[in-house]
Image (cartoon, coloured by chain):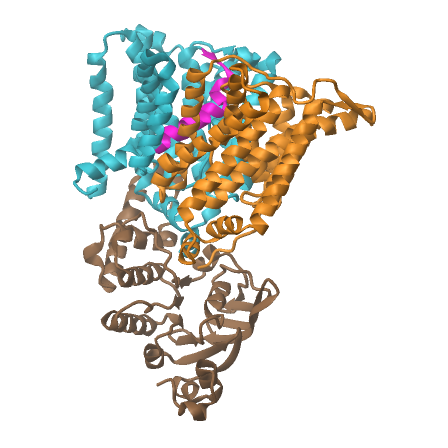
């Protein structure tokens, strides 16, 4: 029992990060129908910039804030300089653009920073907490709480604020949104800034546990994309459930079956779910109007 | 008969380039880069059929390249097969697996299809990396000599190793290109391109969409598998990276950069992305940034890919 | 035996009855039109008959065989062909290729033969090409054969879709607003074309908003309103039916001055 609880706790920690990355995918997808494969690089930027700002003498919270802002700026630049200019291009072209952006950012990080693994101190120390015989790092609680806060705030943002509703309207029908006076270009830029910031936050929260380096973006992009598809692309609740499920499956497989095949089991579950539900767990089936 | 003449012209130009290029090669190294372009071009031609003709994306085709490659490494050792037969076995295995998983996977659309194929590719590379006692694991596995070069030597055709592989892979690429060009303007090719543009309309005129998607998937898997086998036999060594996610992405990038719907674009895309890293190594640290930048710029300014955009430019309408 | 028989057909969208209990039949060589106000369920009815939607209730039979909810490519094999209200053109193919795809079933394509470009495969392509050119001539698009389809005007695309649907050599043809967006001359051309096709023995089921066209060429008219059949009969009968006039104008026939659907 304790063993299972242990796996669940570590699964939730990792899953919360996947959920945040998946949420980033979902927000940009909703605003622009683009699946942004550079999403993982925001996680990397969050960790790396925080580390180097902290090392340069900035207090950790300030360094983290700086990293999140910088990542948001990169998100805006990605939208303005690349995605917006390629509007109307085929989906595969957009995929290549964001993959190109991801390679570019990785190359840039390697150049500006370095190729080492880095870590900054956990926010509340490294003394594990014991829950029902299982242990969790205080930083793990920070990760879970951070993800919960982000999801809660976004829920409020999208349901209670005019800007949030305008983003949803843009996602739903760009032309109609423009007709009622919504600045859809601004909404797209905002979406990129938002999901870059969320990705960077995930990087900040996770670095004390998993460390960071210039090349960890690919892994997070893969997992976040898979989690978003598992839940149903474009549905925030799907990102949450998909991310947590992926984290739990990985942790439980690693614990009971084999740690080398944890990713394999995760993908087998995703394939099985998609065969039964081709639009993911929460995705709506679209009827073609002909 | 305009179309058929452009088909022969494409083949002729490709054959001429393969034949003439070596006259400008200062060293064996260039033969090797050429062979790599041909090997990649073969897999990319398969993806042109899948992505460009049929409009179905795959982010896992390196998985089939891995199957083809490891068949050449493992079948001679465990089954005592000649490498050439192992290559055929790998092709048959890839086709069978593509046929089996294609049925459920191809019901998915767009990004859902992307993630499912991605999952398949990752599964293959994981098995190859983790079953070390059989596959050699992440360190890779040796591949036996194909032996064809020795055979040619006995009949008086004395080629260096690099020259032989340049010619051998070049022939495969030519054959692959010929088949893809044939397909493009045939009844089956039209059915594939039709379902790309409108599935419902294709169904309405009687195209069995499920069957055609599956055919394109199996065919592209065969191309990828052969490409993997050739790579393994040429290098006499193979690692699980051949099946890896990054290789899959690389293949799709080549396909799209060259022009997804264009058969000659496959070779152009493969050439660009195979040569670029060689050229960029001079710039060392900037290599990745420039590679990423080029990918973005081509797609922003030539969204339909190099060859279609350039040929439109040449014909004078932008 | 009627060629197409529709009985009690119905479908719901999110609990809403989009179409309910619709039935009628079409004989070979006959032109039957389905009319009704916007949102009456005409296109939904078409989508059910042609296998694009699965009907929740009722049955469709072709030449006596039950084909309810059968997938479109099998319906095509049984001689049912259709066009679409909001065009479904193969945009990136040439005009000629669009029609050639319509010949798909006659081609009996074989992937291996096509890959190796066998003489049989080349012969099939050549035959298809000739047949498709003839059809393009018939709809007046032969001069645009090698253009990319996306470069055609809306009216030309409508005719291209009809040519593609005819390439199947159908026994029954479903035309969804073939004259929408066409000018008077183009409408007349389509008018002749449809009458011509019917004369050759093909059954035609037509959805159309151009009442003049409908009244002129239909043998039989089915009127839908809010998903249900409210009337059917010959053009003259239907246009005088008070229920029909009310559905169209939302008023009693007397106030509207009768005979609204000249």
**Which is nearer the eye, A241 or B92?**
A241
Query: Does the magenta run of residues contain B213?
Result: no
Seen at 57% across and 43% down, the residue is: A232
Give the left or right position of residue C137, taking residue A14 as reference. Answer: left
Query: Would residue B146 be seen by someone viewing this image from the given angle?
Result: no
Colour assignment, chain B: cyan
**Which is nearer the eye, C112 or B29?**
B29
Q: Position of residue B27 (x, y in %)?
A: 26, 7
Give the left or right position of residue A2, taking residue A277 as reference. Answer: right
Query: Would residue B308 be seen by someone viewing this image from the given angle?
Result: yes
Q: Position of residue B166 (x, y in %)?
A: 31, 15
Which quarter of the rendered picture does the N terminus of chain A lie within?
top right
The correct choice, above or below, for B140 with respect to A64 in the image is: above
Give the left or right position of residue B311, taking residue C10 as reference. Answer: left
Seen at 67% across and 33% down, the residue is: A145
Q: Quadrant of residue A54?
A: top right
The correct choice, above or below, for C136 with respect to B72 in the image is: below
Q: Position of residue A42 (x, y in %)?
A: 50, 29
Give the left or right position of residue B142, taking residue A155 as reference. Answer: left
Seen at 44% across and 10% down, the residue is: B236
Which quarter of the rendered picture does the C terminus of chain A lie within?
bottom left
The correct choice, above or below, for C250 with respect to A132 in the image is: below
Q: Position of residue A268 (x, y in %)?
A: 62, 32
Q: Which chain is brown?
A: C
- Number of marks present in the image shown: 0
The magenta stretch is: B237-256
Q: Which chain is orange?
A: A
From the image, give the main secondary structure of the stretch colored magenta.
Answer: helix
């Amino acid at each position: 029992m304790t063993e299972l609880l242990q796996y669940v706790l570590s699964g939730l920690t990792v899953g919360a990060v996947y959920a945040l990355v998946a949420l980033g995918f979902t927000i940009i997808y909703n605003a622009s129908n683009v699946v942004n494969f550079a999403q993982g690089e925001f996680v990397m930027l969050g960790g790396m910039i925080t580390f180097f700002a902290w090392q340069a003498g900035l207090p950790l919270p300030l360094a983290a804030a700086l990293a999140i802002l910088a990542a948001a700026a990169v998100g805006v630049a990605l939208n303005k300089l690349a995605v917006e200019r390629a509007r109307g291009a085929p989906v595969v072209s957009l995929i290549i653009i964001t993959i190109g952006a991801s390679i570019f950012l990785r190359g840039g990080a390697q150049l500006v920073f370095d190729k080492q693994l880095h870590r900054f101190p956990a926010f509340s120390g490294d003394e594990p907490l014991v829950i029902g015989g299982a242990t969790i790092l205080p930083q793990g609680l920070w990760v879970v709480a951070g993800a919960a806060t982000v999801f809660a705030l976004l829920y409020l943002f999208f349901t209670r604020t005019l800007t949030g509703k305008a983003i949803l309207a843009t996602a739903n029908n760009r032309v109609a949104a423009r007709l009622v006076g919504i600045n859809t270009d601004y909404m797209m830029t905002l979406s990129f800034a938002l999901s870059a910031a969320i990705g960077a936050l995930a990087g900040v929260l996770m670095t004390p546990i998993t460390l960071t380096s210039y090349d960890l973006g690919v892994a997070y992009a893969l997992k976040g994309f898979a989690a978003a598809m598992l839940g149903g692309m474009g549905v925030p609740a799907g990102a949450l459930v998909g991310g947590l499920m992926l984290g739990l499956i990985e942790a439980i497989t690693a614990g009971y079956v084999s740690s080398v095949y944890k990713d394999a089991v995760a993908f087998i579950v995703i394939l099985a779910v998609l065969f039964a539900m081709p639009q993911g767990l929460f995705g709506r089936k679209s009827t073609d109007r002909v | 008969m305009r179309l058929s003449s452009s088909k022969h012209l494409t083949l002729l130009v490709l054959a001429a380039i393969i034949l003439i290029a070596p006259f400008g090669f200062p060293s064996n190294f260039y033969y090797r880069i050429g062979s790599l372009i041909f090997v990649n071009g073969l897999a990319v031609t398969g993806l042109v059929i899948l992505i460009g003709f049929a409009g179905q994306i795959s982010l896992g085709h390196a998985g089939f390249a891995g199957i083809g490659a490891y068949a050449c490494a493992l079948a001679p050792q465990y089954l005592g097969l000649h490498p050439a037969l192992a290559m055929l076995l790998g092709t048959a295995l890839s086709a069978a697996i593509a046929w089996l998983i294609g049925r459920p996977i191809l019901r998915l659309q767009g990004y859902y299809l992307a993630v499912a194929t991605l999952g398949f590719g990752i599964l293959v590379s994981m098995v190859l990396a983790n079953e070390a006692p059989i596959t050699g694991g992440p360190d890779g596995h040796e591949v036996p000599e194909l032996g064809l070069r020795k055979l040619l030597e006995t009949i008086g055709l004395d080629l260096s190793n690099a020259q032989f592989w340049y010619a051998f892979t070049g022939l495969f690429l030519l054959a692959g290109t010929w088949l893809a060009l044939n397909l493009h303007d045939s009844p089956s090719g039209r059915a594939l391109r039709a379902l790309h543009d409108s599935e419902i309309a294709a169904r309405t005129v009687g195209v069995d969409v499920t069957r055609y998607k599956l055919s394109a998937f199996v065919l592209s898997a065969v191309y990828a598998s052969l490409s993997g086998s050739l790579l393994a036999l040429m290098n006499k060594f193979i690692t699980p990276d051949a099946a890896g996610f990054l290789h899959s992405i690389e293949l799709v990038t080549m396909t799209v950069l060259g022009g997804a719907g264009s058969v000659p674009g496959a070779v152009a895309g493969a050439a660009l992305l195979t040569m670029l890293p060689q050229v960029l190594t001079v710039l060392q640290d900037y290599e990745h940034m420039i590679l990423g930048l080029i990918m973005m710029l081509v797609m922003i300014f030539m969204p339909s890919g190099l060859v279609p955009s350039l040929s439109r430019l040449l014909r004078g309408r932008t | 035996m009627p060629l197409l028989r529709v009985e009690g057909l119905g479908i719901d969208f999110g609990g809403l009855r989009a179409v309910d209990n619709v039935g009628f039949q079409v004989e070979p060589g006959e032109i039957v039109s389905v009319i009704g106000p916007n949102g009456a369920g005409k296109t939904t009815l078409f989508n059910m008959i042609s296998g694009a939607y699965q009907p929740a209730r009722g049955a469709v039979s072709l030449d006596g065989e039950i084909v309810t909810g059968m997938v479109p490519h099998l319906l095509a094999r049984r001689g049912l062909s259709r066009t679409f209200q909001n065009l479904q053109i193969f945009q990136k193919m040439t005009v000629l290729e669009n029609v050639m795809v319509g010949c798909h079933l006659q081609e009996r394509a074989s992937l291996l033969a096509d890959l190796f470009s066998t003489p049989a495969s080349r012969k099939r392509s050549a035959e298809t090409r000739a047949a498709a050119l003839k059809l393009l001539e018939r709809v007046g698009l032969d001069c645009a054969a090698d253009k990319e389809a996306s470069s055609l005007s809306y009216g030309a695309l409508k005719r291209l879709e009809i040519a593609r649907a005819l390439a199947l050599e159908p026994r029954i043809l479903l035309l969804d607003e073939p004259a929408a967006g066409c000018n008077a001359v183009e409408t007349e051309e389509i008018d002749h074309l449809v009458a011509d096709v019917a004369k050759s023995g093909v059954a035609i089921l037509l959805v159309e908003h151009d009442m003049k066209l409908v009244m002129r060429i239909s043998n039989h008219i089915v009127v839908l309103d809010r998903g249900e059949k409210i009337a059917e009969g010959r053009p003259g009968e239907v246009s005088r039916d008070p229920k029909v006039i009310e559905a169209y104008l939302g008023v009693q026939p007397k106030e509207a001055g009768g005979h609204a659907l000249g």
